[in-house]
Amino acid sequence: MAYGRHRNLSSYQGRSSSEALKKAEKSLASYRNKTVAFIIATIAYTAFLYSSGGAGHYLGGTPDASLSLSAAKGMNSMRAVGRKLQLTTWNIAAINNNPFEYWITYNNEYEDLMKKVENFLEEPGEQDVSVESVFTEEMFADLENQFKEIGWPSVKSYWDEQFKNRKIVSQFMKDPLLGSKRLTSMPDRITNTINVPGLPEPICRPTVINQYDGDLSNLNKWWTEWKRFMFVKKIKVSTKMGSEEKQIYSMLKPIKKSKYPEITEQEEIDSLPLQTMCGAIFDAILVHMMNTVSEPSIWQDLKRTMVAELNRMKFPHTLQILTSKYAESDIITLQEVSSSFVDNLSESSLGQRFHIISPSNMDGVRDQNSIIMLSKKSFPGGATKEISADITASFSPGVDIPVEKGDILAVTATHSDGVPFVVASFHGDTNGLATKPVLDALMKSIKLDSTLMTHQLIFGLDANTYEKAKPNKQQSVVDWGKHYAKFNLTSCWGDVPNPANYTTFNARTYLQPQLNKACKQSEKQEKGDVNPKDFILFQKGIFNVLQTWKDNTGDGTFTENKAFPTLKFPSDHAILSTIVQAKET
């Protein structure tokens, strides 16, 4: 090595000074050419950002030269190494307290039970007996005594004149007026499942449609436990003054005529005992029906298995799927995430691989939040700034956008290659009416912040869009595609989404309070929520989509025409994942 260096040096020293000068001039010219080429590339890249629909396309000011240069270097690095990014989004779905509410894919025993429940409620025949033959006079007398003890007015006139002689199916369970007055759904909503601070499991009303694990094999056993739950049991509840013990009945709220106009003025006055009586009749009919169409040992064992897998194992199943199949993702956006699941994530192996980012306005009451997971390898610095508040501040003034606390999370982060990103996660309202306004506000907030002009946008969301949307009531997926295209954005599905590319398939059963929304076994696909709802958006012209897939099994595959969740796949939304690669310019 020394000999070689010495020989090269001797050769150089032996050259004439004119030769050395020519070489130096040639080197300087080469350097200048490279510098000019890089500047031109930087200018071209900045122009490309504008023309390609990047965040900077919507900026009103002049781009910052240093930010443009830095972003250009980052994109050049990303292209040079052929960087691929895996992007994943999933609405993991909040825990459903009623394991029977939605049709699931399970086994023949389950299908047989649910079909018998459907037949009982659709064609009851001689089984459409009077209310008093199920919820008996003795039970009503017990209830009246309880009302008297706690100082509530009597509802005997309602019982005698309006309720006891009704048919349990045609005149009670299917009475639309009871629904519009909220006389069964209101007490169910408040008392169905109660989370008590410090307790590992929720407190459940003795009924068929929650996680209650007691014996419901006959009406007498049910009634004993129901009375104890409502009028004897005390639980600790949080108040402004700290915490206090309350009996369950005291948690019920009056039903106001101003909010539910179908209720009469007298019914509003009597609404506490009246809704309690209707709730008791409702639960009694459910217990009677289940023990009529099935042996108690069969349906109760099925329920216990479903509760274990759909409810108590929901978090473990969700974690297992993310860990085993999607841990290599660079970015994961999740929706409908509870605060306790965020803790689960942080304490799992995923917490070692990802920065787990929650919204600053996280909703601990509704407890359905959008979060972002950034790979620590790809984004070593994690999130640099949250811009969620900038988005909500950009909503059109005076327009009511149906967005709740925790629905939106948007942050900035820089990839290890040096590329700056805006990453957003969003959970749309049921009808998808907030989806377009939220995108508008996101792009507007980027426009108002000149530091974001060269950031690449990655937006994972449950858009809640519909294949056959009800005009002015639901968001059409075709219209949604046209809308994001206006911002020069594209999706993992391409520029134009396929309306039949479904990411949900769920339908309500007959074992839930809103029978008007129930779907027959044979009509799950026709009348259920089978729609293309989930998307990953990014700027057009920046990335090539190499692969996109849906997953409703937890093993990376999608089974068409199958209702979910299942006992192993814990959500009513499919997982959506895509692999993209920076385009050559």
Image (cartoon, rainbow, N blue to C red):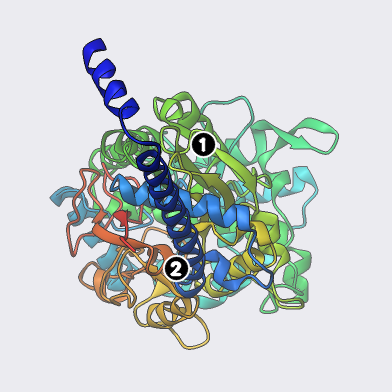
In this view, which residue lies farthest toward the left? 108
Q: Residues within 10 Å of mark 2 (few under 14, many from 20)?
A: many
Query: How many discs appear?
Result: 2
Report x, y in % for residue 557: 18, 51
- For disc 2, the marked residue is 464
- For disc 1, the marked residue is 356
Residue at 27 percent across and 73 percent down: it is 123
Which label was assigned to residue 470?
none
Q: Which image quadrant: the N terminus?
A: top left
Is residue 194 placed above or below 366 in the rendered structure? above
Is residue 471 placed above or below 504 in the rendered structure? below
Front of the two marks 1 and 2: 1
Q: Using the rendered image of the protein, determine whether residue 187 is visible from the camera's viewpoint.
A: no
The reply, left or right, for residue 29 in relation to residue 143 is: left
Q: Using the rendered image of the protein, determine whether residue 452 is visible from the camera's viewpoint.
A: yes
Report x, y in % for residue 546: 23, 58
Report x, y in % for residue 533: 38, 67
The reply, left or right, for residue 323 in relation to residue 113 is: right
Residue at 77 percent across and 31 percent down: it is 243
Sequence-earlier tag: 1 or 2: 1
Q: Which image quadrant: the C terminus?
A: bottom left
The secondary structure type at the circle numbered 1 is: strand
The reply, left or right, for residue 168 in relation to residue 579 is: right
Residue at 59 percent across and 37 percent down: it is 195
Q: Amino acid at mark 1?
A: Ile
Q: Quadrant of residue 197?
A: top right
Most foreground residue, 39 or 169: 39
Q: Amino acid at mark 2?
A: Asn
